[in-house]
Image (spheres, rainbow, N blue to C red):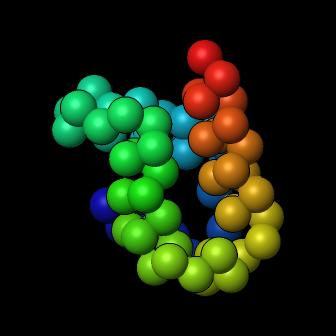
Amino acid sequence: MIVNRAGDLSVEYFQSYFKLLMNTRNFDIVQAKEFMFKRFFNEDVTSLGECTYQRFEQAYSSLKDE
């Protein structure tokens, strides 16, 4: 998936992507987070900006608690 680096990604975007990975790759939430952190952020929390990383963490937290 191509990520437009010009804008901030939403919590809903990350929630949808988490669910997609969990459904199509049979990942649990932790595996999905690790995969996305490598794929989206190249293991660098600053790569897409602080706001986008915070939304990624919010999406993870909201799904982890379900």
Mark yes or no: residue 47 visible: yes
Check the image and report above or below for 40 versus 9: below
* Image location (x, y in percent) of residue 11: 67, 42
Q: Quadrant of the C terminus?
A: top right
- Residue visible at 61% across and 41% down in the picture: 60
- Which quadrant holds residue 13? top right
Q: Is residue 8 left or right of residue 30?
A: right
Q: Quadrant of residue 29?
A: top left
Q: Is residue 25 left or right of residue 36?
A: left
- Above or below 32: residue 20: above
Relative to 33, does residue 60 appear above or below in the rendering?
above
Residue 42, given in percent of the width and then of the height, sits at 46, 79
Tell which of 65 and 51 is nearer to you. Answer: 65
Q: Report the label total.
A: 0
Q: Quadrant of the N terminus?
A: bottom left
Q: Is residue 4 left or right of residue 46?
A: left
Residue that lies at the very extreme toward the top in this rendered image: 66
* Looking at the image, residue 16 lies above or below residue 55: above
Residue drawn where x is 68% and y is 37% of the image: 61
Would residue 33 appear left or right of 58 to someone viewing this image? left
Identified at 70% across, 62% down, the residue is: 52
The answer, for residue 20, to whether it is visible in the render is no
**Residue 40 spot, x, y in % from top left:** 46, 68
